[in-house]
Image (cartoon, rainbow, N blue to C red):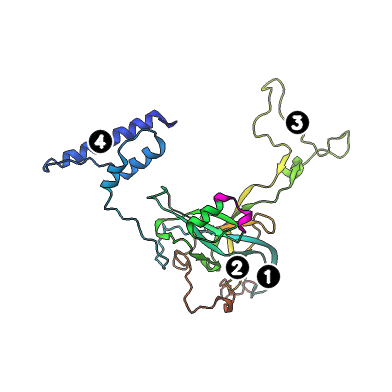
Amino acid sequence: MSALSRGLISRLRLTTATTASTSTTTTTTTTTTNPSVSPFHFFFWRRFSSEALVDGTEFNQDQHHHQPKIIEAKPGVMTPNSKRTGVIALKCGMSALWDKWGARVPITVLWVDDNIVSQVKTFDKEGISALQIGCGQKKEKHLSKSEVGHFRAQGVPLKRKLREFPVTEDALLPVGTEIGVRHFVPGQYVDVTGITRGKGFQGVMKRHNFKGGPASHGASLSHRSIGSTGQRDAPGKVFKGRKMPGRMGAKQRTAKNVWVYKIDPARNLMWVRGQVPGAEGNFVFIKDAVYKKPDVSMLPFPTYFATEDEDTTELEPIVADLGEIDPFMVAD
């Protein structure tokens, strides 16, 4: 038995026995009884216990009628409970634009570089529903043998960056599906995750915004120091979580509710308002906002599928709808 608590194993065993007895009772009118085991119990016993609850062949025979779901690359209908995949982008830098009303908009340029689905994970096989997205290109000599074997097994090109995004079952896409910048719609809100700039070992004034000590009046070599870190005999220690000097930055952070100002399908570029974590050239991960959820009717689901006669090189940039009312002319 593995490290899982014995109490949980006992409860699962009791629940399974109850399910089997119920199945036997309901089939008293038949000549034979077949105490089946639910996929839920079989999955948990296979994952957390070294003891075999049921024979795997018997379980497969009971479930022989269950056919795996065929995943197709076709448009669908998005529901409020649906969850789409995200994309991997490259941070190009920051600039500023002026909208049609003359307002200055600080923007960050993100490049969605050749995103494709590199692996599909389903609940029947892996126990979760997720998509693995690959971004960029990389030579075989710069990858490990295990990474090259993974890409060859999936039949996809070698990718520079991989990221797994949990999705709902209705948002699954087949391996090799391309995901471009039109996966998002200008005007919607997204969450952008990245690694912040590393600033090295910093003092408390920069790291925690401390005030510091006085410049004169007897202060000697303590102008930017931390000051007192606690009390005396009681408690006689420094409490955990005390703000002190240390490494600053290089942490994964998420900028939430970032507004998409403009997209350029021809170059796979996206302009978002404000700053996002990371330095220029770093990878960031973009997905639909959790708090400011976009309207499901305006989003392509599960992603945008281009038509056969569509020439993406001739597409014009798409800007968010700013309305017909000039904000500078509205009376207070």
Mark 4 Cα-neighbour bin, 10 Å: few <14, some 14–19, many ≥20: few
* Residue at numbered disc 4: 18
Mark 2 Cα-neighbour bin, 10 Å: few <14, some 14–19, many ≥20: many
Q: Cα distance, mark 4 to mark 1?
A: 66 Å
User: Residue 141: horizontal and vertical position, in percent?
Assistant: 63, 55
* Residue at numbered disc 2: 261
Res 187 → quadrant? bottom right
Camera-near label (3 vs 1) is 1
Confirm or deny contact between disc 1 and disc 2 (CB under 8 A): yes
* Residue at numbered disc 1: 97
Mark 3 Cα-neighbour bin, 10 Å: few <14, some 14–19, many ≥20: few
Where does the magenta region start and end? 139-146
Ranked by sequence position, the earlier of labels 4 and 3 is: 4
Q: Cα distance, mark 4 to mark 3?
A: 62 Å
Provide the secondary structure element on which disc 4 rests: helix
Camera-near label (2 vs 4) is 4
Ranked by sequence position, the earlier of labels 4 and 1 is: 4
Total numbered circles: 4
Confirm or deny contact between disc 3 and disc 1 (CB under 8 A): no
